[in-house]
Image (cartoon, grey):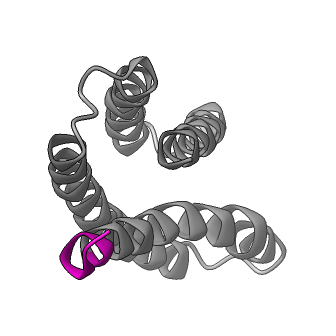
Amino acid sequence: MSTAWQAVLYVHLLAMAFFLGGQLVIGLALVPVERTNPDKERLRAVARRFGIGSAIALAVLLATGIAMADHYSLWGSDTLRLKLTLVGALILLTLAHLRYPRAHVLQGAILLVTLVVVWLGVDIAG
């Protein structure tokens, strides 16, 4: 792998780490703490910032993922097609979550689909 493509993969993985890691931190650390010591404004501010960062991360993931799929001729991969279908579902779930922020089932679905997408990415890379 050339240094340039290694850098593209690195940026892709950083964006994935932000997207998934943020979900885990907010869901497993911030929300439980906020439940015991509620500060709705603080939680909203964190959610807004994470939302902006997630949108940027998703754009980076799409750009770098498309570039790597093209470079490595992966468009014929059934695994990639499934991953892209789930990315589309992830985008729809995220938009629904913006509309219904208190719907915990959407938060859980976003996390679950994200974990499957990451698994499929590992499968493609392996």
Residue shown at 38% from the left, 32% from the top: 96
Q: State the residue at coordinates (38%, 29%).
A: 80
x%, y% of residue 15? 37, 68
The reply to whether the magenta stretch includes residue 22 is: no
Magenta stretch, overall SS: helix
Q: Residue at x 24, y 45 (%)?
A: 72
- Which one is in front, 68 or 46? 68
Give the quadrant of residue 9.
Answer: bottom left
Residue nearest the viewer, comparing 57 with 51:
57
- Res 20 → quadrant: bottom right
Q: Position of residue 31 (x, y in %)?
A: 70, 67
Range drawn in magenta: 1-7
Query: Please, is residue 88 above or below residue 62 in the view?
Result: above
89 vs 72: above or below = above
Q: What residue appears at the point 37 percent right and 34 percent down from the top-left corner?
A: 87
Q: Is residue 41 above or below residue 69?
A: below
Circle count = 0
- 108 relative to 89 in the view: left or right: right
In the rendered view of the protein, which quadrant contains the N terminus? bottom left
